[in-house]
Image (cartoon, coloured by chain):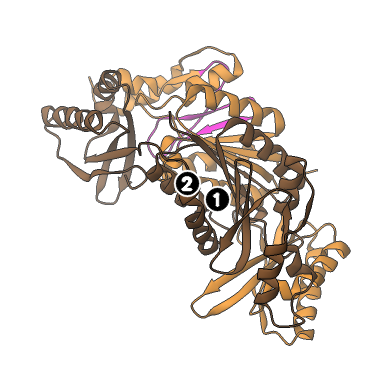
Chain colours: A brown, B orange
């Protein structure tokens, strides 16, 4: 049975529409390649009560939770405190985090704000930050990472070796210049024949024409191939031009 | 008091990392311009139980809920049924939706799959779709829209005139080539002085150098201006080059 994961994105800048969250998509693709199913994403603002509530709901419902954002030096960075509160543990300077950060700054510049980044909930293990030193951390089933995409990616690389692995989802994508309503009945029939494959239908509207991308996804390669072949056979019956634009690839790259 | 809103994004393609959700950001910016605070975003897959659970949680907690995705003709489009289940109402062909869709297709092509798009929960009002006919709908405090961005935007335009309005958030953005840890203490002090302004600090790492964007947001224009001026005064004290890269703009464009 594959593990279930959730992402908690923390930050007013996502909810205001100022910043496009791209971290979730990156984490989703990495998890997919490991065979971990991402079941839910939540975005909340820089409000302690909301972070605590969402984190406690997600960590109870899923095997793994990844958070992004809110671990910098400024007053709006409240994730570490919220995580400590969610777990009911204390928070204080972590000796190693403190030492790493102290070494980063010239004498006299390791100020109170920067020391805040060394505050880590009791019992958490650090996640190294190869980009800008200030670490993330791991407590229980929760991985707490930065919001800046470059930093988040560097932290996730450190986390990946610790994660469980399952059979990765693979996907085949077929693009056809047909409206999805014309193929929906057969798609539903193929879906019934292949219950272990998830068949997705994604219409597109381009200047060069409209059509649909049909994606067969699953952990069983032969079943995914069978579903894709059945879709292609149906498109041939209809006399519709179609091509596999993605051969077997890990899900997320589909 | 401004209204609180949430977005529920529905679709396996977001959770797999295949598709970048840009609908949430667009809705966030539109809501911001109306003075409606977006409090939460959730993303769930094409699983009825999860859609029902998330929708019931969000519609109880917020004044307004916007959903995107899952209202097409294929077997993986289950949003309308899930919404009916969440509200405990029946679902059937909506006469007007049926008529609009029937008129769209050549004789004989209005098949069962396409008729599915006319299935609307009892008591819902249609949201017109100027792009591809198949309507969204509005039931209780929930607005159900398409996932294809062009279609979602067309539907949202129809919805906007029905929405309540508040004082829009406005924002001023100041960019400075300084590390946020060097200004964090004063930012916190300014935040305390201006409790009605939310001050955000967003570091950037570019090839041309690192720095921070400092954003003052709020509904009270004079308070936002005061906070921005205080931030600029501090940067001058530090001898740091800084500029307003965005003057007073609606939040989301900050």
Q: Secondary structure at mark 2?
A: loop
Residue at the bottom extreme, as displayed? B239
Q: Residue at point 54% right, 63% down?
A: A151
Neighbour tally class for label 1: few under 14, some 14-19, many 20 plus, Cα within 10 Å: some
Relative to A213, is B76 above or below? Answer: above
Neighbour tally class for label 2: few under 14, some 14-19, many 20 plus, Cα within 10 Å: many
Is B2 one of the magenta-colored residues?
Answer: no
Q: Which residue is mark 1?
A: B25
Picture coordinates of residue B122 (x, y %)? Answer: 55, 15
Q: Secondary structure at mark 1?
A: helix
Pick whichever, B26 or A162, lies toward us. Answer: A162
- Magenta range: B121-146
Picture coordinates of residue B120 (x, y %)? Answer: 48, 20
Determine the image quadrant of residue B96.
top left
Relative to A189, is A7 above or below? Answer: below
Mark 2 to mark 1: distance in Å?
A: 8 Å
């Amino acid at each position: 049975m594959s593990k279930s994961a959730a992402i908690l994105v923390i930050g007013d800048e996502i909810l205001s529409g100022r910043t496009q969250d791209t971290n979730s998509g990156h984490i989703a693709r990495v998890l997919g390649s490991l065979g971990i199913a991402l079941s839910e994403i939540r975005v909340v603002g820089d409000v302690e009560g909301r972070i605590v509530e969402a984190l406690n709901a997600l960590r109870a419902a899923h095997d793994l939770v990844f958070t992004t954002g809110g671990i910098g030096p400024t007053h709006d960075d409240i994730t570490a405190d919220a995580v400590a509160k969610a777990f009911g543990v204390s928070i204080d300077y972590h000796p190693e985090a403190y030492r790493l950060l102290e070494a980063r700054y010239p004498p006299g510049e390791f100020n109170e704000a920067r020391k805040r980044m060394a505050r880590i909930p009791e019992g958490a293990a650090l996640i190294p930050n190869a980009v800008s030193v200030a670490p993330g951390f791991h407590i229980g089933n929760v991985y707490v990472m930065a919001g800046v995409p470059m930093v988040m990616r560097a932290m996730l690389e450190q986390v990946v070796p610790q994660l469980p692995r399952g059979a990765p989802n693979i996907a085949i994508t077929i693009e056809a210049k047909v409206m999805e309503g014309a193929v929906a009945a057969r798609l539903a029939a193929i879906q019934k024949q292949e219950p272990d494959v998830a068949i997705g239908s994604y219409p597109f509207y381009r200047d060069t024409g409209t059509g649909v991308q049909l994606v067969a996804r699953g952990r069983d390669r032969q079943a995914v191939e069978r579903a894709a072949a059945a879709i292609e056979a149906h498109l041939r019956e209809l006399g519709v031009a179609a091509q596999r634009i993605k051969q077997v690839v890990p899900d997320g790259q589909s």
